[in-house]
Amino acid sequence: MVDAFAGEEVHGSGLRPGERTSLRDPHRFGLWVEWLVDQEGPHGWSPGRVPSSYRWVLVGGWVVGTIAVRHALNEGLVVRGGHVGYAVAPGSRRRGVASAALRSALGIAARRGLGAVLLTCEVDNLASTRTIVGAGGRPAGIRDGSARYWVPTRGPRVTQDGTVGGA
């Protein structure tokens, strides 16, 4: 799946720059998967990162995408990244995979106690914009070229500033 991105960033994967080739080694791949699992725990995450839940999107037994649900925001994620990152391999796009992945991510966020999550995308990424708005995303402005949206996880009302009201 990573090869299908042909060098593009794989949002929501936890894949760090330079790891593509090294992860072909089964031992290194296993260590990376352990690292992903550790990011979900209360103390295992790396400096500068926030606790996160990583998942792979499977269709017909093949990994076709990735999801990251960040349990909190830091200064950088408020501008770019938000609570949820996801990616769908080019050959699996326009088939509802991103919408299903986002629904799954919203469920994970809800179970983590988040009533609404911030999602960001490039302002010219119309496919991601449609996916986010289709999930109930409310525009929250543009910062540094990233469109920002608040998306409810359990149906509460979300105002323009991200304040969550009653369901």
Image (tube, rainbow, N blue to C red):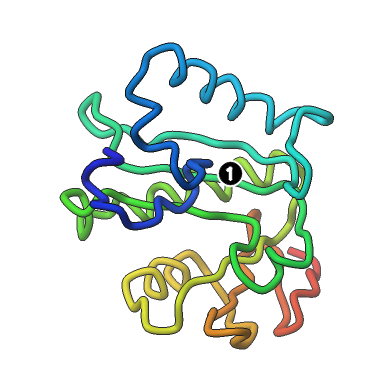
Measuring from the top left, give residue 57's x and y in whole percent: 37, 37
Q: Residue at x 55, y 70 (%)?
A: 120
Where residue 56 sits, quadrant-wise, is top left
Q: Residue at x 36, y 76 (%)?
A: 125
Q: Amino acid at mark 1?
A: Gly
Q: Is residue 101 above or below residue 28?
A: below
Q: How many marks?
A: 1
Q: Nearer the viewer, residue 150 or 36?
A: 36
Where residue 39 sits, quadrant-wise, is top right
Point out the image quarter for the C terminus: bottom right
Q: Is residue 116 above or below residue 143?
A: above
Measuring from the top left, give residue 135's x and y in whole percent: 48, 64
Question: On the rendered structure, is 135 left or right of 62?
Answer: right
Q: Residue at x 33, y 57 (%)?
A: 8
Question: On the rendered structure, is 162 left or right of 32?
Answer: right
What element does badge 1 sit on?
Answer: helix
Local crowd at mark 1 within 10 Å, few (<14), some, or many (≥20)?
A: some
Q: Nearer the viewer, residue 2 or 161?
A: 2
Query: Which residue corresponds to mark 1?
Result: 107
Measuring from the top left, give residue 127's x and y in whole percent: 32, 71
Question: On the rendered structure, is 4 left or right of 119?
Answer: left
